[in-house]
Amino acid sequence: MNPYQVSNSIKLGDFSTSEIIEKGSKKLKKLNRQLSKLQDAMYAEGKYAVLVCLQGMDTSGKDSLIREVFKEVNAQGVEVHSFKVPSELEKKHDYLWRHYIALPERGKIGIFNRTHYENVLVTRVHPEYIVSENIPVATSVDVLDDAFFDNRMEEINNFEKHIVNNGTIIIKLFLHLSKDEQKNRLLRRLRLKEKNWKFSPGDLKERKLWDEYQWCYQELLNKTSTSYAPWYIIPSDDKLSSRVMVAQTIVDTLKKYNFKEPELPEKYKVEIGNYKKQLESE
């Protein structure tokens, strides 16, 4: 079993945020190539899609991880969706609608940069966001108790089971960052002029809610890590090592499916020699 997989009830504080992978650059390049070949075979077979779910505190490295882990995959084979505050149109539908319509088609890798889990994470820390959805049960913040969020997590489990049963491989990755490392990365955004655009004063407001977010993450990791869609807790204080661990987890998962490229029909196989002659004689 993958050492980062959540398979039992966990306490998030027991998991390290720091792990160094030796020769990380060399290993990542090898994994990049393997992932590219796996996606090619998956596309040719046409039976499965892959959904990679990335969650983590601000500055945990999601954007750069996507760039570095999937850099060798055919650009047409990867789709990235970053979910921000719901639009007015999205609010007119149930909270899973915008995620469902963004799912990857068979043969492709879809990446959710922030995911449907924001609906039991940021909304749990800020329940007023759910009141703004104008759904019948959310008449006020006071009614949004633990049972409400437990029910949402059960709905998410059912959503994931449904898409797994229909050919989507789900890989859920929590980039586990320490509070000290987040501080260092926020300071770097302020010190480096070219990184200033990434900084928002809201980052500091959310940082003050660190403990609440950690508790909410622990809850969702415990209640939504399933046999068909497990969570992996990835130590992420070191970005390169985090990328290697993520790439290894994805490659190891996809190898289990033994994707097979379709063979040329027999009636065409026997004519290959003739086809070659036609082309060579042009």
Image (spheres, rainbow, N blue to C red):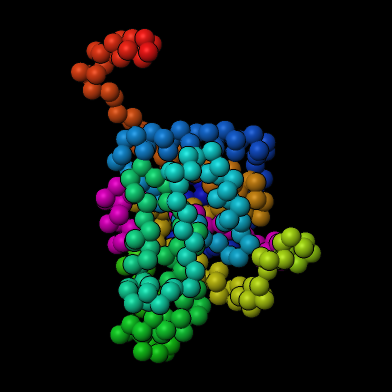
Q: Position of residue 239 (x, y in %)?
A: 65, 50
Q: Position of residue 161 (x, y in %)?
A: 30, 56
Q: Residue furthest left?
A: 267
Residue 155 appears in the rendering: yes
Residue 171 appears in the rendering: no
Which residue is at a point 56% across and 42% down the rendered structure image? 71
Which residue is at a point 61% across and 59% down the rendered structure image? 60
Q: Position of residue 155 (x, y in %)?
A: 31, 67
The quarter of the picture where the C terminus appears is top left
- Relative to 232, say whether 99 is above or below: below
- 6 or 185: nearer the viewer: 185
Q: Is residue 1 left or right of residue 193?
A: left
Q: How many marks?
A: 0
Q: Which residues are magenta?
A: 158-185
- 180 or 261: nearer the viewer: 261
- 111 or 270: nearer the viewer: 270
- Relative to 261, say whether 53 is above or below: below
- Relative to 46, say whether 185 is above or below: below
Q: Position of residue 265 (x, y in %)?
A: 23, 22
Which residue is at a point 20% across and 18% down the rendered structure image? 267
The quarter of the picture where the N terminus appears is top left
Q: Is residue 89 left or right of residue 183?
A: left
Which residue is at a point 38% across and 33% down the rendered structure image? 41
Residue 279 among those drawn in magenta: no
Q: Residue furthest right?
A: 191
Residue 182 among those drawn in magenta: yes
